[in-house]
Every structure is written in structure tokens, then in C-alpha cells.
Image: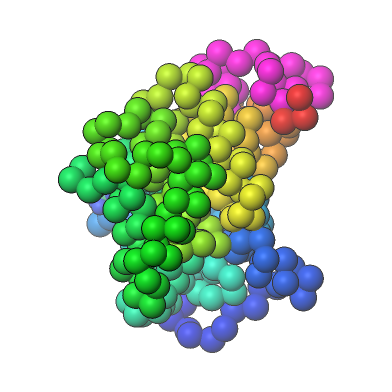
């Protein structure tokens, strides 16, 4: 399979209203029958998902489930063996390297270990994407844009510090500031709460929500953290051995019809309510 066609994809159910929504509120991502094999090993098998503009999707699953493999496909670092990834009506899986470079400017990535450059100050780290891609900007404008993002993320005054002089949570926020500099239409977070204490993890969850609310970005979060997923997700997708085994909004998901979904919820220590699906203090409405 693996359609090589360059024809423009117009989604089967895409309306004009959805198109203009996508323009203002982050991009729409369609994952159509994606398979990724490494030799005989099938790391992802026939995954289909529809990610709405401005939504938060949490992809959860055990080690080796295929989460990072899927993320790499979504940000164009890898290509599927078959199937298509459609971002804002463009087939990313059929793009040339030049087209992918253009597309990647619309996509921000917050790496698992922040990936700040140790020898650069916070200001230089956060300014990096502007220096690479916005050569039209003057130094003074760059500093102003960086200060503005740092201030929004509660990092005002840290400009001159080195990453080693920041706490774990501050590093994640600096990495988020950097990812936001080119005003992406989608943000991808790889394990944003791993390595943080539970309170800092919840602060990062709030930050992901606030970032979506403020900038309207479509957000895809890779996580092991069920409590966080139930708290922030519009949609949770559970991967197991390369397959999408359960998905749905937290209320549906927390009813835990799938045994692995139940096991994840049980392992996270969240008490399940069989009634309305409110989940131990992390119900979105409360
Ligand atoms: N380049 C590769 N070559 C061969 N196998 C690979 C490659 N990349 C990933 N895999 C395999 O695909 C499977 C899924 O890997 P992936 O990194 O996506 O897991 P994950 O869900 O991110 O796990 P973790 O939570 O441990 O990060 C694993 O069995 C892994 O060994
Ligand atoms: Mg991984």
C-alpha cells in the first residue's frame, strides 16, 4: 500500500467551518491506517486516529507499546511503512524532505529530557528557533519575544541562567517556551511529567492545558501517567504492542471496559467510580 500520490487530501467529512477552525485553533491531524515495521517486527499496526484542532490527546501505553515510534511519525522524523498522516489536509507521509522542513515549522516538540543546550543561557536556548528560522528579526525583537514567552511561563528573570541552574519543572517550562517560539499549530510532548514529583507533575499538566487554552494549539502528549491523562485529555488513546486497543474521552475511558485500561487506572492508584465516570479528584469538571 503506502499511497505515493501527491494529490491534495480533502478529508471525507471536512467542512468549511472545520477548515477555518483549523486555521485559528491549531491543526487537525488524521492518522489513517498507519503501520510501521522494522524488518519483520511490526512496531505499529493499522493505527487510525482523528485529532481535532485545539484538542489535547494523550497517548498512553507501556514500555515498547510504540508511543515514541508514533510520535516520530507525527513530527515527520520517520515515515510509515503504510498508511497516511494528514496534517491540515496535507499528506505528510508523501512529502519530500523540503516539504517536511516547512511542515515541521508548524509543529513544536517538547522533548522528554527538555533537551536544553547546557552551555547556553535560558535566553539563548529559547531564542534558538528564532535565530534559525526568523533571520528577518532584529536582536532587540528576539530578546523581547523571548522575554514575553518566559514571562507567560513564569520564568521572568531567568534569562541569564544556565539550564543547570534551573529546577526540573523550570527546565520543562523553558523547553515549552522554546517550542512555542515559532507559534506552532501543534505541540508534541514526550513524557512531559516523567522524572517530576507528583506536585510538579500536576503543575506541568496545568501548563499543558493553559498552553492549549491560550494559544489554541493541538496538543499530543505521550505519557505513562494515567492520573495526568485523565486530568488533561480530551481524548485518551491506549497503545499496546503496536495496536490501538482503547480510546475515548476520560469519562468513557475511566469506565475501563478494556482490561488493560482498567489495569492502567488501577496501577495509578486512582479509585474508579462505576457511575458517571468521575475519577478520584481528577474529573475534568471538578
Ligand atoms: N529503529 C528501530 N529499529 C527496530 N526496532 C525499533 C526501532 N524503533 C523502535 N523499535 C521497536 O518498536 C517497539 C516500540 O518502541 P517505542 O520506542 O515506540 O516504544 P515506547 O512505547 O515509546 O516505549 P517507552 O515507554 O519505553 O519509551 C519496541 O519494541 C522497539 O524495540
Ligand atoms: Mg518512548
Q: Is residue 145 left or right of residue 133?
A: right
Ligand 1 shown in quarter: top left
- The mark tally for this picture is 0
Outermost residue toward the left in this view: 119
Residue 274: say if magenta: yes
Picture quadrant of residue 105? bottom left
Residue 207 in view: yes
Outermost residue toward the right in this view: 276
Residue 14 in view: no
Residue 3: say if magenta: no
Residue 155 position, x and y percent, is 44, 39
Please say if 93 is above or below 125: below
Outermost residue toward the front in this view: 140
Residue beneath the point at 45% across and 51% down:
147
Residue 39 position, x and y percent, is 25, 57
Q: Quadrant of the N terminus?
A: bottom left
Q: Nearer the viewer, residue 263 or 72?
A: 72
Please say if 98 is above or below 268: below
Residue 68 position, x and y percent, is 38, 46
Residue beneath the point at 55% across and 41% down:
208
Q: Quadrant of the C terminus?
A: top right
Main secondary structure type of the part rendered in magenta: loop
Please say if 268 is above or below 32: above
Residue beneath the point at 53% across and 48% down:
220
Q: Tell me where the magenta segment starts and ends, as one range.
A: 260-283
Residue beneath the point at 61% across and 40% down:
209
Residue 179 position, x and y percent, is 43, 53
Q: Nearer the viewer, residue 251 or 217?
A: 217
Amino acid at each position: 500500500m503506502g499511497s505515493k500520490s501527491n494529490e491534495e487530501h480533502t478529508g471525507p467529512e471536512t467542512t468549511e467551518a472545520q477548515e477555518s477552525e483549523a486555521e485559528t485553533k491549531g491543526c487537525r491531524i488524521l492518522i489513517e491506517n498507519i503501520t510501521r515495521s522494522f524488518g519483520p517486527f511490526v512496531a505499529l499496526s493499522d493505527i487510525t486516529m482523528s485529532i481535532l484542532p485545539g484538542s489535547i490527546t494523550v497517548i498512553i501505553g507501556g514500555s515498547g507499546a510504540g508511543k515514541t515510534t508514533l510520535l516520530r511519525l507525527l513530527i515527520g522524523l520517520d515515515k510509515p511503512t503504510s498508511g497516511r498522516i494528514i496534517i491540515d489536509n496535507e499528506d505528510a507521509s508523501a512529502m519530500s524532505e523540503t516539504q517536511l522542513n516547512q511542515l515541521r515549522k508548524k509543529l513544536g516538540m517538547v522533548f522528554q529530557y527538555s533537551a536544553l543546550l547546557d552551555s547556553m543561557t535560558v535566553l539563548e536556548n529559547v531564542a534558538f528557533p528564532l535565530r534559525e528560522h526568523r533571520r528577518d528579526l532584529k536582536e532587540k525583537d528576539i530578546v523581547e519575544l523571548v522575554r514575553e514567552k518566559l514571562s507567560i511561563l513564569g520564568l521572568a528573570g531567568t534569562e541569564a541562567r544556565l539550564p543547570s541552574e534551573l529546577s526540573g519543572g523550570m527546565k520543562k517550562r523553558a523547553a515549552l517556551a522554546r517550542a512555542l517560539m515559532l507559534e506552532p499549530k501543534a505541540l508534541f510532548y514526550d513524557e512531559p511529567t516523567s522524572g517530576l514529583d507528583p506536585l510538579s507533575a500536576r503543575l506541568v499538566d496545568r501548563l499543558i492545558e493553559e498552553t492549549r487554552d491560550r494559544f489554541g494549539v493541538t496538543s499530543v502528549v505521550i505519557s505513562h501517567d494515567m492520573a495526568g491523562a485523565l486530568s488533561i485529555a480530551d481524548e485518551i488513546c491506549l497503545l499496546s504492542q503496536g495496536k490501538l486497543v482503547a480510546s475515548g474521552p476520560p469519562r468513557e475511558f475511566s469506565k475501563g471496559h478494556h482490561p488493560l485500561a482498567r489495569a492502567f487506572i488501577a496501577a495509578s492508584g486512582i479509585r474508579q467510580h462505576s457511575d458517571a465516570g468521575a475519577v478520584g479528584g481528577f474529573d475534568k469538571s471538578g
